[in-house]
Image (cartoon, rainbow, N blue to C red):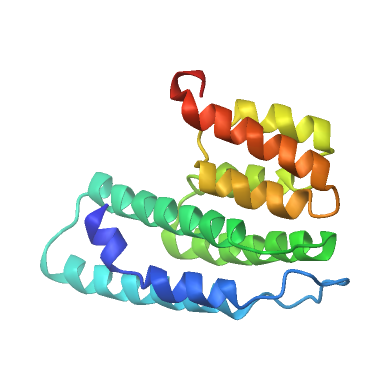
Amino acid sequence: MTVAAQAFDLRQILSSMAKINWEVKDVMSQHNSYIDMILKEVHIFTVRLEQVAMKVPIPHAAYKCLWENIAHIVTHTLVQGFSEAKKCTNGGRALMQLDFTQFLTKFEKMSQLRPVPHKEYVENYVKAYYLPDIELEKWIKEHKEYSSKHLFGLVSCACQNNKKMKQKLMQVIEELEKNPFNR
């Protein structure tokens, strides 16, 4: 995981994601520039890996492991960036999906991994934005794989127009945080 993590400037990616306006009414057909930044870094990793492979054979299992680690790092970085959105409309959520779809399409070609590991981690998180408030509470309790910070971000955006529900769901997350054995 360390080798894969050093291949990316995660701070820069998160910084670029923080500048995105997720409060859009309509989604254009163009993905955001942070996806290009990620894909450029994936391409650089690919070139470096090929250079190493010319000098030292890389076993298929090691090659696959490296790509799985890259997928893990990028998907978790995307969720982190999405969770830091202050406000988000349905158009913004659709933009998140567009960005992730663009990433997946290109990443599959570069990594030759099908399906891309941890794909559901991002998809489930973005889909949760669309859940009705009552179902969102159930979803929060069932999805233990997300950090409290990610859940707080989700609730802040998903319930931005319903302060009462937002407060209730924040309390649910805090309770889950206090009693990690229930998670």
Estimate the x, y position of residue 121 in percent, counting from the top left. Answer: 56, 44
Estimate the x, y position of residue 128 in percent, counting from the top left. Answer: 72, 43
Estimate the x, y position of residue 42 in percent, counting from the top left. Answer: 41, 70
Estimate the x, y position of residue 101 in percent, counting from the top left. Answer: 65, 60
Q: Is residue 24 above or below residue 145?
A: below
In the image, is 89 to the left or to the right of 177? Answer: right
82 or 108, nearer to the observer = 82
In the image, is 11 to the left or to the right of 81? Answer: left
Q: Tag count in the figure?
A: 0
Q: Residue 8: tell me if it is visible.
A: yes
Residue at coordinates 19% horizontally, 65% vertically from top-left? Answer: 53
Q: Is residue 134 above or below residue 25?
A: above
Residue at coordinates 32% horizontally, 71% vertically from top-left? Answer: 45
133 or 28, nearer to the observer = 133
60 or 152, nearer to the observer = 152
Residue at coordinates 45% horizontally, 59% vertically from top-left? Answer: 74
Residue at coordinates 74% horizontally, 66% vertically from top-left? Answer: 95
Q: Quadrant of residue 160?
A: bottom right
Q: Is residue 30 above or below residue 170?
A: below
Q: Residue 39: tell me if it is visible.
A: no
Residue farthest top in this picture: 181
